[in-house]
Amino acid sequence: MKKRVIASLLALPLAVPAVHAQDNAVRISGFGSGALTWTNTDRAEFGRPNQASGADKHVTTGVDSNLGLQADAPLNSWLSATAQGLVRKDAEDDFGAELTLAFAKAKLSDEFSVRVGRMGLPIFMISDYRNVGYANTFLRPPTEMYSQVVFNHLDGVDGTWQHAYGDTNLTAQLGVGRSKADLAGGLTMKGDNVTVLNLVAEHGPLTMRIGRADTKISIDNSTTVNGLLNGLRAAGSGYRFAQLNQLADDLQLHRKKASFTSAGIGLDWNDIIVQSEYAKRKIDGYANDTTSWYAMAGYRVGKFLPYYLHSSLKIDSAVANTVPGACPAGYPAACAPTLAALSNGVNRLKVSGVGQGEQETDSIGVRWDFYRSVALKAQVDRVRPQNGTGLLIAPQPGFRGPVTVGAVSLDFVF
Amino acid sequence: MNRLMIAVIACALAAPAMAEVVVVANPKAAEASMTKDQVAQFFLGKSSAMTPVDQAEGAPIRAEFYKKVTDKDASQVKALWSKLVFTGKATMPKEAADSAAVKKAVAADPKAIGYIDKAAVDGTVKVLYTAP
């Protein structure tokens, strides 16, 4: 009897907040991470994809901390509206707020719904909840994979169809629209004519997905790139190297065809957790064609979930540098240094900008679900840039890596 | 103080074993019975054909239901729902304060599905599944 009383008393304060749920009320929910991140070097910074600055030996909160707030409003039995804002450090040096979701959803049947507005772009296994630390095992999405598409959202329309074939649930999602992202350095990346297909099959503990996204991509406001392109065209016309004009056209990222094809697998079987993704990016223009993948394995021990993660990013191909190595006899003296500078600029393009470069990372970490709706994570990464400085930010001359990154994060949902 | 903590923890662990959980729906629901996996898909957000009604967070019956029907503990279930909620694919199940409130919600909605203590079953709801 006494036990019952104590149990009831314990349950009471927990139960009270739950009673308010009502049918047509607006629901406010949120997620967030409070995190500290540091590295073992001051000669380069480590950040998440598209951050303007990152962590070095000084502990920073900016890399892995964020806060999201969401409102869901059912309008009637089949129509609802959702808005979500996210505060984090992205592209700029300060914490900034962005509108990550803003859509109306019409549930046309038990199996089919249509959304209009701003949705998450479903190109990764965890694409549209990659910022929700609590929903993921690892402390941050693998940089090698998740730097490959900077777009977060789709402004347009999508339809989702869900059907059960026996014990297998199939979800097919097709979206069309456009996307835009602010990049570090004040640049803007635009995606026009976006089409995205996402197929997910779930069978018991196993989840498999394949996806494909196509767009016409542009970065028009990079003064560095535009300067280089102007230089190539001026030299091409001035010195009559027709291939330089062609090279400038090939490099220029203006409404160029881009695609991202990806597959993923997830397993949550008894105490075993496995998650892996593989993706190929193809972009006409100076952004590299790349292959990225990662594999994570974890094993649940009570409330603890230790895990290991390996991730990799490789360049498959980049636009060939056709700048001539020498000037024909009789050309002006300025010709040779001009060509050398242009050639150098072209070579640098494939390792400049967000997600450009080659890198591998091994990580170990642990997630501890120590309290309801709150998880504490710790992760150590060994980041190894390949053929340059990888995805590290602001590398100093001569920096080569590898870099060790440490982070602890308190992830929560409410 | 330590003793008290142990008593409290023991109590929290011991309490769930006492209740027997049954899954209930509106008497008008088409289904006469369900398998464990069928029930689980509504409570894990994999199907929206029925509307799940949860018990209060922290209630022993809730932990027992998820352990027996989905093989998952509260934080695993919460992480799963976080994926759906924060992508705008679904909203968290409504919560009712206790078995009586679940019965009321289920009796009022032909698409609702809930779970209650077996002792609370009466004519206002239909039992679809009994947890072992």
Image (cartoon, grey):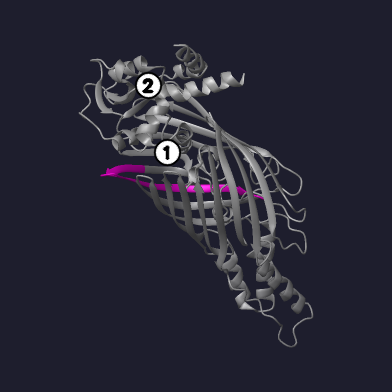
Q: Position of residue B36 (x, y in %)?
A: 30, 35
Query: At numbered mark 2, what does the secondary structure look like: helix, strand or loop?
Result: loop
Image side of residue A24 versus residue A17, left or right: left
Q: Label 1 lies in what chain? A: A
Whether residue A139 is visible, yes or no, is no
Mark 1 residue crowding within 10 angstroms, few (<14) / some (14–19) / many (20+): some
Position of A113 relative to B1 (above/below): below
- Separation of disc 1 and disc 2 at Cα? 48 Å
Q: Position of residue B22 (x, y in %)?
A: 30, 24
The residue under label 1 is which amino acid type?
Val
Report the span colored magenta: A160-184
Q: Nearer the viewer, residue B66 or A83?
A: B66
Residue identifier under label 1: A116
Q: Position of residue A93 (x, y in %)?
A: 70, 44
Q: Position of residue A133 (x, y in %)?
A: 55, 40
Q: Residue at the spot x=30%, y=33% of the render?
A: B49
Q: Is residue A257 shown in magenta?
A: no
Position of A156 relative to A16 (above/below): below
Q: Nearer the viewer, residue A302 or A16?
A: A302
Query: At numbered mark 1, what does the secondary structure look like: helix, strand or loop?
Result: strand
* Quadrant showing the C terminus of chain B: top left
Q: Residue at the spot x=43%, y=49% of the render?
A: A266
Q: Residue at the spot x=31%, y=16% of the render?
A: B120
Position of A293 relative to A163 (above/below): below
Residue identifier under label 2: B18
Would you identify the image quadrant in which residue B92 lies? top left
Name the disc covering residue A127, or none. none
Whether residue A369 is visible, yes or no, is yes
Image side of residue A322 versus residue B46, left or right: right
